[in-house]
Amino acid sequence: MNMLRMAVLLGCVAVSWWALAGLKFERFVSAPGSRQAKLLHLLLAVVLGHQCAAFVFSYIGWSAP
């Protein structure tokens, strides 16, 4: 069960990373190619992915009999 949770979490982080790739970061950061901007992209993907996975697990918990 833990491996499934980890796989869902990593999948959600990957989807968040992919979705954030379409965002124009140059509007929000002064140097889009810098390490700080890349770290911000990574942190946003992890936070969004974690929230998405938490929603999925909560939804499964509520819908299970």
Image: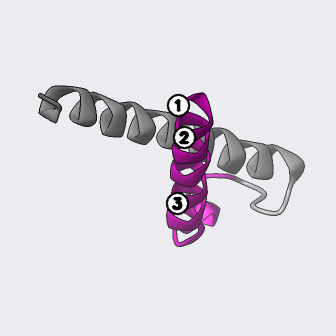
Residue extending furthest right? Answer: 35
Which amino acid does the dot numbered 3 rest on?
Val
Which amino acid does the dot numbered 2 rest on?
Leu
Q: Which residue is mark 2?
A: 4
Residue 7 percent location from the top left of the image? 59, 46
Residue at coordinates 51% horizontally, 45% vertically from top-left? 8
Residue at coordinates 24% horizontally, 27% vertically from top-left? 61
| Magenta-colored stretch includes residue 51 | no
Please tell me which of labels 3 and 2 falls first in the chain.
Answer: 2
| Magenta-colored stretch includes residue 25 | yes
Toward which corner of the image does residue 34 lie, by quadrant? bottom right
From which residue to which does the magenta span run? 1-29
Q: Which residue is mark 3?
A: 15
Magenta span: predominant SS is helix
Residues at circles 1 and 2 in contact by the CB criterion of under 8 Å: yes
Label 3 neighbourhood size at 10 Å, few (<14), some (14-19), many (20+)? some
Quadrant in which the C terminus appears? top left
Measured Cα–Cα span from mark 3 to mark 2: 16 Å
Q: Secondary structure at mark 2?
A: helix
Q: Secondary structure at mark 3?
A: helix
Residue extending furthest bottom? Answer: 22
Residue at coordinates 48% horizontally, 41% vertically from top-left? 48
- Asked if residue 43 is positioned above or below residue 58 in the image, the reply reads below
Q: Which residue is mark 1?
A: 1
Measured Cα–Cα span from mark 1 to mark 2: 5 Å
- Mark in the foreground, 3 or 2: 2
Toward which corner of the image does residue 52 lie, by quadrant? top left
Q: Is residue 36 left or right of residue 23?
A: right
